[in-house]
Amino acid sequence: MVKKKAIFTVTENLNGIFMDSEVGKVNKAQTKGSTATSKLTITIELALTTITRQMEISGNRARTISDYNVYVNHFVNTIKVKYVDELNADHVYEWLASMNVSNQTKLTRLKCLKAFLSRCFDNGWIERKFWRPIKVKVDNRVKEGATERDIRVLLSVLDLNDFVQLRDATAALLMFKTGLRINTIVHLETQHIDFTNNLLRIDGSIVKNHDQILLPFDDTLNRLLSVLVNHNDAIRREYDQENSYVFITKKGGIIATGQSHNNIQKRLNKYAKEYGLKNISPHALRRGFAKSLLDKGANITDISKALGHSNLAVTTQYLHIDKEEVAENLRRFL
C-alpha cells in the first residue's frame, strides 16, 4: 500500500466550521420538514453507512459506532423494511418484542436505535420523531461498587514481583483511586502522568466525553506506576515494541485488541472468581471510587466531574446508598 504523503494531510482544526454557517442553517430548516425541499428516500443500509461516516468525522468512539451498526443491522434483519421513510413505531415495538433478553438490555439497544433514528431525522430522511414515546421499563437497581476491603484483599493476594500481577494491581488501584474507565486505562500513556505533582493530566482524545481531566493520585500509586513504567521499557526493548502505553502485555503490546478482548478486564474477573471477591471489575472499581469520595465528604459535583459525567443524574446512579443510610444522613439535619 502506498503511504500517504504528508502534503495531503490538513493539520488545521476545521471541526464544527459549518455549524453556524449558512449551510448549517439551510440543513436545519430542511430537517424541520421545509416545504421548499422534497423528502429524500434512502435505504436504511445507505443511511447507516452515511451516519457511520458522519460519526467517524465527528470523532465518536469506535465502540459507539460499532454499537450503532450492530443494533441497527439487527433491527433491519428483524423487521424486513428497506427504506428509512417507511419506518414507524410498530416496527420498533416488533423489534423489541422479538428479543429474548432482559429489559435492561432492551433499553440499551433501544437507546442506540433512537439515536440512529434521531440522526436520520437531522439529515432530513424522516419527517417526525415517532420513536420518542417508546419506552422500556426497567427497575433501577443500584449496583454496588468495590469497597476498601475488596481492593485491600485483592492487592494482598497479588505477587508484585510478577510483571503481570504488578500491572493488574496497579490498574485496579488506579481505577479505584481515580475512577478512570477501562477504555481510558487501555490508552493511558506515560506522558499523561505527572510524577512530580502526583497528577494525571489526561487529554480528551482518550476520554469518553473528550474533555481534558486532571486527577490526583497518592504516593503509593506514584511508586507502583514508577516501577511499572520502568519495567515496561525493559519489556518493550526485549520484544522490539514502540509505544508509550502504561499498561502493556507480556510482549509489550496494547492490552486490548477489541471490545471483548481486554487482558486486564479478563484477569480481574479471574481474580474475583478465584478469591471470592464480589465487586472486583472495572465498573465496580469506578463505582467504588465515587462512593468512597462521597463517604469522605466530597461534593457530588466534583465527583461527577472526576467521573467525566455529562450530568449529575448519571453520577447518582453510581452511588450505592441504601434507605437506612439515607435516613441516618437526613437525621443529622433535623
Image: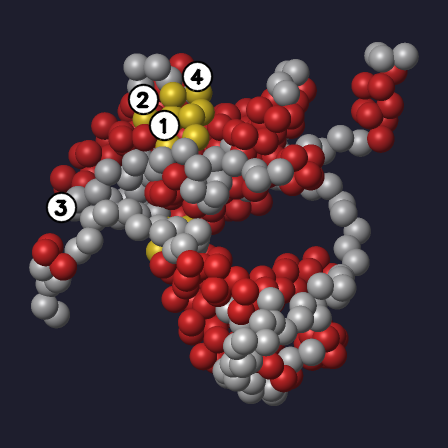
Which label lies toward us, 2 or 4? Answer: 2
Residue 198 lies, in percent from the top left, at: 37, 17
Among numbered discs 1 and 2, the one appearing first in the sequence? 2
Among numbered discs 2 and 4, the one appearing first in the sequence? 2
Residue designated by label 3: 240
Quote the CA–CA distance across marks 4 and 1: 14 Å
Crowding at dot 4, Cα within 10 Å, few <14 / some 14-19 / many 20+, comes out as few
Q: Secondary structure at mark 3?
A: loop
State the residue at coordinates (38%, 21%). 199
Among numbered discs 2 and 3, the one appearing first in the sequence? 2
Q: Nearer the viewer, residue 18 or 201?
A: 18
Among numbered discs 4 and 1, the one appearing first in the sequence? 1
Q: Amino acid at mark 1?
A: Arg
Q: Is residue 116 above or below residue 318?
A: below
Horizontally, residue 188 falls left or right of residue 110, namely: left
Among numbered discs 3 and 1, the one appearing first in the sequence? 1
Disc marking residue 194: 2
Horizontally, residue 326 falls left or right of residue 220, namely: right
Quote the CA–CA distance across marks 2 and 3: 26 Å
Disc marking residue 218: 4
Q: Nearer the viewer, residue 136 or 230?
A: 136
State the residue at coordinates (54%, 81%). 38
Res. 2 image quadrant: bottom left
Q: Is residue 160 above or below residue 308?
A: above
Residue designated by label 1: 201
Quarter containing the N terminus: bottom left
Q: Secondary structure at mark 4?
A: loop
Quote the CA–CA distance across marks 2 and 4: 12 Å
Q: Amino acid at mark 4?
A: Asp
